[in-house]
Image (cartoon, helix red, strand yellow):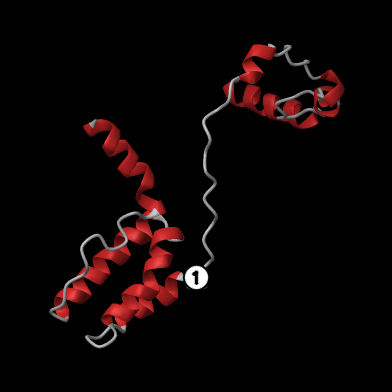
């Protein structure tokens, strides 16, 4: 008896036009649409509020793209030698400061430090420390300390 009720349920579901759909067919066809004319008008703004000047924020121009890819950066780091160390660091710094994400930035800085150790050289103090990738973390740390 139990088997036949399951078969009966399966047959009724398959025979139904709405089968296993979540919405009835009429609900799927008629969707609510919000037009710009239906939007709520904004509240009037007091004139006193408009006269107050907001603090001026200087717009920082976006830096020019370096044209380096992550693959190029990895290759530059791998091919560093004692003679080309400082020039390679100068080439990579704009990419690390403005284009690299947080994970790639961290990995690249570690690779550079390891390469410097192999070559018995030192990475300059403060090299690529003001990176865009670490700005949020630095701001959070500064707020915690203050």
Residue 35 appearing in the image: no
Residue where numbered disc 1 is placed: 66
- In this picture, residue 39 sits left or right of residue 127: right
Q: Residue furthest left?
A: 120
Provide residue 142's location: percent of width, then percent of height: 27, 37
Provide residue 110's location: percent of width, then percent of height: 24, 65
Q: Secondary structure at mark 1?
A: loop
Dividing the picture into quadrants, the one containing residue 140 is top left
Foreground: 12 or 36?
36
Q: Is residue 141 above or below residue 121?
A: above
Q: Give the residue drawn at x 72%, y 12%.
A: 43
- In this picture, residue 105 sits left or right of residue 20: left
Q: Give the residue drawn at x 37%, y 79%.
A: 75
Q: Is residue 138 above or below residue 61?
A: above
Q: Give the residue drawn at x 25%, y 59%.
A: 126
Q: Is residue 84 above or below residue 139?
A: below
Foreground: 50 or 45?
50
Dividing the picture into quadrants, the one containing residue 127 is bottom left
């Amino acid at each position: 008896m139990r088997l036949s009720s399951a078969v009966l349920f399966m047959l009724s579901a398959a025979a139904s036009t709405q089968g296993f759909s979540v919405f009835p067919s009429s609900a799927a066809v008629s969707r609510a649409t919000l037009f710009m004319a239906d939007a709520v008008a904004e509240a009037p703004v007091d004139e006193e509020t408009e006269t107050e000047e907001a603090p001026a924020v200087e717009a920082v121009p976006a830096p020019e793209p370096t044209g380096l890819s992550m693959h190029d950066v990895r290759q530059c780091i791998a091919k560093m030698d004692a003679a080309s160390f400082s020039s390679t660091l100068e080439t990579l710094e704009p990419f690390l400061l403005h284009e690299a994400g947080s994970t790639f930035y961290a990995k690249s800085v570690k690779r550079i430090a390891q390469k410097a150790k192999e070559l018995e050289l030192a990475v300059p103090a403060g090299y690529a420390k003001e990176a865009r990738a670490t700005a949020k973390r630095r701001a959070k740390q500064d707020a915690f300390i203050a």
